[in-house]
Image: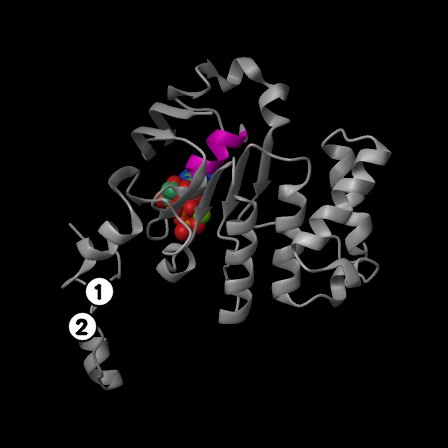
Amino acid sequence: MTLSIDNLTKNYGSYTALNHMVLTLTPGVYALLGPNGAGKSTFMNLITGNLVPDEGEIYYDGIPIRELGAKFRGILGFMPQQQGLYENFTAYRFLSYMASLKGMGSREAKREIAWALEMVHLTGQAHQKLGAFSGGMKQRILVAQAIMNDPKVLILDEPTAGLDPKERIRIRNIISKISTGRIVIFATHVVSDIEQIAKEVILLKKGHVIAEETPDAFCQMMEGKVFEAEMSETEFARTGNAFPYGIS
Ligand SMILES: Nc1ncnc2c1ncn2[C@@H]1O[C@H](COP(=O)(O)OP(=O)(O)OP(=O)(O)O)[C@@H](O)[C@H]1O
Ligand SMILES: [Mg+2]
């Protein structure tokens, strides 16, 4: 199973958000790192078909995904970066709704919902309203909808955003557990989310892939470039906008 990204380019007007990206992805977890605006969500939305490339092509096992159409969407799981939840829906009703959007029959939906709830540790909360969920539980139910129906390609756009360390570890463990035999792309700003589970780190900057490394090699690359320092607020203000991904 291979997802090949061939010269993928996306422009918004005169701005190039993704610039001739070339990548080959096989089963395993890929960490997608990069500062705000690097093009992570653009890349993900091109895979899911929410955006159409200006140049280039994405191939799944050698066939362009635009030719595969619904067939490709059927093997895709997606957790978008910003997703509203129906606060009045229970977790179970939300997953039933997502299952019907994915075209599942009722018996299949029942089985998939039970499995997905189990995976994200929300079986006991299935009949609670989403409005009463904590941020971490909401993220987990969004992960649950993405993993239903056995997706071969799983796209998670910052699934750990805004979570406390415990919930981050939970999400990381869930993703690690279900990653076998799937291509998983996991966007995050936090290296500790992925250093133990990713087979590769893809670093994006201004629409370019500037590094593609194993997590170990990536961390080595960062050696000497990342440091901790104690300083006063005034001193901090003087450092200017030293961004953590500021490799040039
Ligand atoms: N619909 C749009 N119209 C115009 N410009 C856009 C649009 N969507 C994204 N962009 C621009 O494209 C660039 C890449 O955006 P993208 O959302 O892909 O970045 P990102 O890496 O996901 O950032 P973040 O970490 O903030 O989620 C940004 O400069 C953004 O302003
Ligand atoms: Mg984004």
Which circle marks residue 70 in the picture? none
Q: How would you rate the neighbour count of disc 2 (Cα within 10 Å): few for under 14, some for 14-19, many for 20 or more?
A: few
Q: Secondary structure at mark 2?
A: loop
- For the point 57% across and 54% down, the residue is 174
Residue 239 tag number: 2
- Asked if residue 97 lies in the magenta stretch, the reply is no
Q: Which residue is mark 1?
A: 242
Instruction: Locate residue 65 relative to residue 203 in the image: left or right.
Output: right
Q: Which residues are magenta?
A: 42-48
Q: Amino acid at mark 2?
A: Thr
Q: How is the image coloured?
A: one colour
22 or 183, which is in the foreground? 183
Determine whether 127 is above or below 111 in the image. below
The tally of labels here is 2
Q: Residue at x 81, y 62 (%)?
A: 128
Q: Is residue 47 magenta?
A: yes
Q: Quadrant of residue 203?
A: top left
Residue shown at the point (75%, 67%) measured from the top left: 132
Mark 2 and ligand 1: say if the CB distance to the nearest ligand atom is below 8 Å. no
Indicate the secondary structure of the residue bearing disc 1.
Answer: loop
For the residues bearing labels 2 and 1, Cβ distance under 8 angstroms: yes
Judge left or right: residue 65 versus residue 53: right
Q: Amino acid at mark 1?
A: Ala
* Quarter of image, res 151: top right
Q: Nearer the viewer, residue 217 or 96?
A: 217
x and y percentages locating residue 93 in the rendered image: 82, 49
